[in-house]
Image: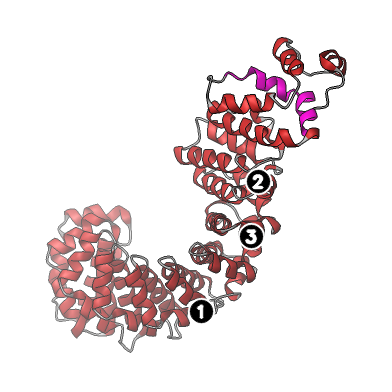
Amino acid sequence: MVAELATRPQNIETLQNAGVMSLLRTLLLDVVPTIQQTAALALGRLANYNDDLAEAVVKCDILPQLVYSLAEQNRFYKKAAAFVLRAVGKHSPQLAQAIVDCGALDTLVICLEDFDPGVKEAAAWALRYIARHNAELSQAVVDAGAVPLLVLCIQEPEIALKRIAASALSDIAKHSPELAQTVVDAGAVAHLAQMILNPDAKLKHQILSALSQVSKHSVDLAEMVVEAEIFPVVLTCLKDKDEYVKKNASTLIREIAKHTPELSQLVVNAGGVAAVIDCIGSCKGNTRLPGIMMLGYVAAHSENLAMAVIISKGVPQLSVCLSEEPEDHIKAAAAWALGQIGRHTPEHARAVAVTNTLPVLLSLYMSTESSEDLQVKSKKAIKNILQKCTYLPALEPFLYDAPPNILKHVVGQFSKVLPHDSKARRLFVTSGGLKKVQEIKAEPGSLLQEYINSINSCYPEEIVSALSKYHCKFLTSPLLQFCGLGFHF
């Protein structure tokens, strides 16, 4: 009855007030096996509900009895006892440590060798919830000998067991390069890579997560994952109907591409950039995030890799994310990626500028509603792009809208381009750009003033004087003639 009542949240407080923990502890020692099993199930359900009840299980000294019985009892009790350990350990590192301190790990590892798949699964769940918290607890799980047995579990035919074993390996590998190396040394990567195309979506996203957690730590570990021949197989996961599979596949590719230009080039050669761009276009929200970051990492490595992103139509897709996504952290990632693409050469900067991205970045930077991270990333992206951009039609609106710290970079680009481009010089006058420059208030001797002087020196003094003197929006042909017909600027 207690086990049944514990399935309903509204009953939990009443059970707790009734002192149910001490009653159940007594029932764990009952001579009837089914009573022991049901008492353990009730404890697990209570401990699973919140950390207060999980702490009560620890304080009532129930864990040692569970661990002792775990090694002695039948498979039904083993599953129920492992469920209690899992329910206690999931809440916090302190509660997980209490499980370790009572000697549960050795017994749980023994359960991974049980003939019953359900016992193996229950033990793997408990080990996963202990390992997930921090490196120290994860190392304790490794030291107990769990990893080789978890690798054997992913080779079992039961899908549920494969899932939790892959998930446990992922949680072990995520904390440090050393722990990830332990997973690799146990031969996990080859077996995980072979299951990437398994039809079960939940298993796929656990496998992709585990490979990502291994890949993220170092070049060597990423190369070991690549050598398991995950390309081009993993690219098919980017078209999966399950959003978690898409996201985890993008994350895996990101973790590989971020390390070196060589690994990024390998991803490009496999068709990874185009596949990720298509994936970004087919989903929304956080599913897009790892793909956006992957494009930024690839583009950051070199001019050629950034150009590969441009050629694959990555810039328009990132611009869409920047404009459409409601979440600031996704916008910030898109801004950062666009900045990495545009920072290399004038050609790269132009590819970003022609998508009308710069005004959007400026708006996000200046908006009081933008998060601090989004403002910082937008500002950095604008600066990266502007310092290389020679496409003047994209720069000119900034003369009117940009704040002083951005304006100096814009004027600086005009001062570089105008002396060498006669057509641009004429357009700069007739569009009103030159007049706007005369209106900019710059400190004498400042870098901004130097840029303005450089621009003014491209034109006859009469033109500059007239623009400074007359309050006209456009410099018309008669005024041009008035100011000095025959000057070729």
Q: Nearer the viewer, mark 2 or mark 1?
A: 2
- Residue at the disc numbered 3: 304
Circle 2 Cα neighbour tier, 10 Å, few/some/many (<14 / 14–19 / ≥20): many
| Magenta segment boundaries in residue numbering | 424-441
Q: Is residue 164 visible?
A: yes
The x, y position of residue 281, in whole percent, is 65, 55
Amino acid type for the residue under numbered disc 3: Asn
Label 2 close to label 1 by CB (< 8 Å): no
Q: Which is nearer the eye, 488 or 392?
A: 488
Q: Which is nearer the eye, 432 or 192?
A: 432
Amino acid type for the residue under numbered disc 2: Ala
Circle 1 Cα neighbour tier, 10 Å, few/some/many (<14 / 14–19 / ≥20): few
Label 3 close to label 2 by CB (< 8 Å): no
Dot 2: what SS? helix
Q: Which is nearer the eye, 264 or 53?
A: 264
Q: Which mark is residue 349?
A: 2
User: Which residue is at a point 80% across and 18% down the rendered structure image?
Assistant: 475
Hey, which residue is sitting farthest bottom in the picture?
A: 115
State how far apart marks 3 and 1 are (Cα): 24 Å
State how far apart marks 3 and 2 are (Cα): 14 Å
Dot 3: what SS? helix
The image shows residue 155, relative to residue 427, as above or below, that is: below
- Which one is earlier in the sequence, the residue at label 2 or at label 1? 1
Quadrant assignment for the N terminus: bottom left
Indicate yes or no whether the magenta region holds residue 389: no
- Residue at the disc numbered 1: 227
